Image (cartoon, coloured by chain):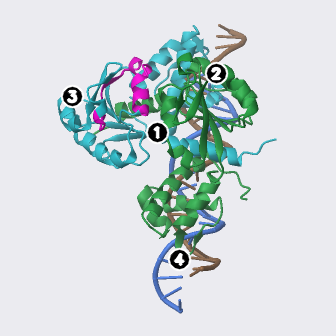
Chain colours: A cyan, B green, C blue, D brown
Amino acid sequence: MAERKISQAIIRRLPRYYRYLGELLENGVERISSLDLSVRMKVTASQIRQDLNNFGGFGQQGYGYNVKYLYTEIGKILGLDVEHNIIIIGAGNLGQALANYTNFEKRGFVIKSMFDTNPRLHGISIRGIPVRMIEELSDYLNKNKIDIAVLTLPKTNAVDVAKIVVNGGVKAIWNFAHTDLHVPSDVLVENVHLSESLMRLSYNIANTKRG
Amino acid sequence: MAERKISQAIIRRLPRYYRYLGELLENGVERISSLDLSVRMKVTASQIRQDLNNFGGFGQQGYGYNVKYLYTEIGKILGLDVEHNIIIIGAGNLGQALANYTNFEKRGFVIKSMFDTNPRLHGISIRGIPVRMIEELSDYLNKNKIDIAVLTLPKTNAVDVAKIVVNGGVKAIWNFAHTDLHVPSDVLVENVHLSESLMRLSYNIANTKRG
DNA sequence: TAGATTGTTAATCGATTAACAATC
DNA sequence: TAGATTGTTAATCGATTAACAATC
């Protein structure tokens, strides 16, 4: 559609628009102006209009935006209208936490299997999702089309496992391991480095002047 | 020290520098040039020098940067040289995952207590960290100096709990609930919205052209 | 000293905000 | 129609990169 290059800054904001629109929808709000939304979201109305217009003219002069329509359209832009098959590699606390989080399924992210090195977890299942041994991973990927691999394992294993999933045809990695992954340019990596997030908070505690 | 305003863009990069320097240190590397580091980190040398010079001249012409010194200094900038008392509110999978993550302790983040609504968790402890009932939270905060509250609970409770911790004198909130918190301006919030992270990945899967 | 590399200024690039004509 | 509000262009602001004099 829009052929212009969308910056990551904009992409970063899209899910937040989606969340706010979802809440408005739940509250039965039918239409909203960029100004009204900007007040709620604490951003500028200009930014909202600029962001949305990268993807098309979703609004109408004198009216604003239809909440339901815009919500649906942003959902499509975010690829939430198609199903994504996911596996979680690392069935520790964090992996299990993600497996138990049912909201992902609602958005089309279907968790097909988990993998772990720990033989004690062999054969168990979490919310119906089976835990397999890491040795089966490569074979499993050959037999099943998996879009996203979630890496919730120690950084020492992350690099090797990333290689396996890339070879297995996975397009995208959601990386919770505390290391950067170097993968071919057609494989996407989204990092969630929790310790870095906590350090930013710590920085701001140390450097914020208080009255 | 440096009186100029540090942008959040720079702060966002600091923990990554810290991680790379920590790894260099582990590998026995004594000194490194901005160019050498830039290649490893896949950023420009210019950016590294600009970033660091916001906080002082840590390098030396013709030599580069002393790894250990720079690592220590960035640690100080990030506030990792002082202890932070933490509580985790919400002892579900994610809360327990964070409680079990011992690396936080190494960086001076000491988890003092957890809180939950579930009476079944009453009296148990995770890695020595006691789980208390949410009713005790307000009283606990009056008796203990807590710097950071981690919110790993459903969004329906997050707003109310945020009020309680703010009233209890907590300076900073690490928010994993899927909602924005509105707190007084002297209270910091660092959001970790996992579902938004996953949507960004999904967007990029849908919109990346592949050869 | 000569070579290397920083610290820092200047140039460029990109993102955000403001403004307003178009139009519902 | 008049009023409201978008879509979009232009202006501003900030962040990144380039360049190089300073200096170890």
Which label number is shown at residue B62? 4
Q: Is residue B45 above or below residue B151?
A: below
Which mark is first along the chain, 1 or 3?
Answer: 3
| Residue B187 appears left or right of B93 | right
Residue underneath mark 2: B134
> What segment is highlighted magenta in the picture?
A93-119
Distance in Å between CA atoms under marks 3 and 1: 25 Å
Which mark is first along the chain, 2 or 4?
Answer: 4
Crowding near pointer 2: few (<14 within 10 Å), some, many (20+)?
some
Tell me which amino acid carries mark 1. Answer: Val
Residue underneath mark 1: A192
Q: For the residues tagged 4 and 2, is the chain the same?
A: yes
Distance in Å between CA atoms under marks 1 and 4: 36 Å
Tell me which amino acid carries mark 2. Answer: Ile
Q: Nearer the viewer, mark 4 or mark 2?
A: 2
**Which quadrant would residue B29 be assigned to in this image?**
bottom left
Q: Residue at x 26, y 26 (%)?
A: A123
Residue underneath mark 3: A144
State the SS at label 4: loop
